[in-house]
Amino acid sequence: MGLDVFISGSVRRGWHILALLFVALQVLVCSGGKMKIVEEPNTFGLNSPLLAQGNRLQPRATPSPVSGPAHLQKLAGKCFSFIESTYKYEFCPFHNITQHEQSFRWNAYSGILGIWQEWEIVNNTFTAMWMREGDSCGNKNRQTKVLLTCGQSSKLAQVSEPSTCVYSLTFQSPLVCHPHALLVYPTLPERLQEDWNEAEQALYDGLITEQGYNKMLKEIFEEAGFLKNKKLKEKQPVSNPSRKFDTLEQCGEEVRKQTEEVERLKALLSQHGIQHNTQPGATEPPNSHQPTTTTPASKERHLRGDTGLLSDVL
């Protein structure tokens, strides 16, 4: 009888110990201890590797036309990859640049850091390619500046983020190693080269300021397709000249402004002793008291923009 009591008491104590262990386990789970439940990752999001790349990345703009030096245009249609930490960058010249997070996170980032827009031109030289209109980043869009440097092979060499959502990449290529490989002037059609010559001469003769000269160059670069013409969208709706003015008074006011501008330009030319025609094809008798400053010799000295290279004048 005593043995039965002893066994019964041992069983009851065993159940009590198991109950206490179960309660302790619940406390650990519910109190945020080392033991916790992890949800199954969602593999049906926009960044799912099961989806095609084209379905994940939706560009917000179309690339600008291919432009710039002819020997660099052969890069169009090619892509170059670079891995930095857990991110893979892919640069496709004249198209776009993307970033892909190399991890198994359910929401790993894959996005567009910029779409080809325009060149950066400094001192008659193509210095960088601007990729803009990338994915949204707060109240702005991501953009990337791709610097061009000389290298033994064409590749991405460096990636940084100088400011939030503004990236900087360095692209090396033997195509840019020649001293004249990135000059702007030789890539222009002959007509725009002549426009540049005239702007250079006008600056030399003091007819325009440095600011006016830079404005003329910007217009030349826009017409050549090197820079994005931000006013193009504003000009497109005005396809019919008759719609430009709503009233006759507006038309008359515009004519008056244009007439005043013509008279101002005539006075400026006369001040510097430069002949001008009042009508297309008309000629004026030369003024013996006002010498002409545009001579063949002076124009010959200023036929090109400054290349920034000493070898051009040696």
Image: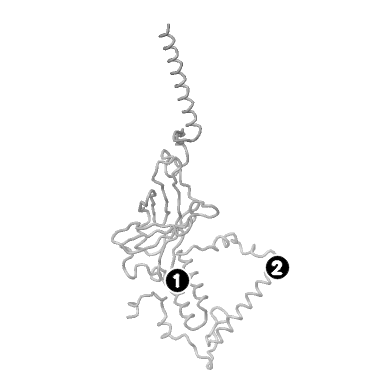
- Residue found 70% across the figure and 68% down from its top: 248
Q: Is residue 58 above or below residue 37?
A: below
- Splitting the image into 4 quarters, where does residue 70 fall? bottom left
Colour convention: one colour
Locate residue 87 relative to residue 202 in the image: left or right.
left
Q: Which mark is residue 147?
A: none
Residue 130 point in image, percent of width and height: 44, 60
Are dots 2 and 1 in contact, CB under 8 Å?
A: no
Residue 306 point in image, percent of width and height: 41, 76
| Number of residues whose C-alpha sits closer than 10 Å to that of mark 2, classed few (under 14), some (14–19) or many (20 or more) | few
- What secondary structure is marked by label 1? helix
Q: Is residue 205 above or below residue 151?
A: below
Q: Is residue 109 above or below residue 265?
A: above
Of residues 36 and 199, which is closer to you in this image? 36
Of residues 92 and 64, which is closer to you in this image? 92
Locate residue 187 relative to residue 257 in the image: left or right.
left
Which kind of residue does numbered mark 1 sit on? Leu
- What secondary structure is marked by label 2? helix
- Residue found 38% across the figure and 65% down from its top: 69
Q: Which mark is residue 248?
A: 2
Name the N-terminal-most of marks 2 and 1. Answer: 1
Q: Residue furthest bottom?
A: 289
Of residues 14 and 89, which is closer to you in this image? 14
Residue 228 point in image, percent of width and height: 49, 62
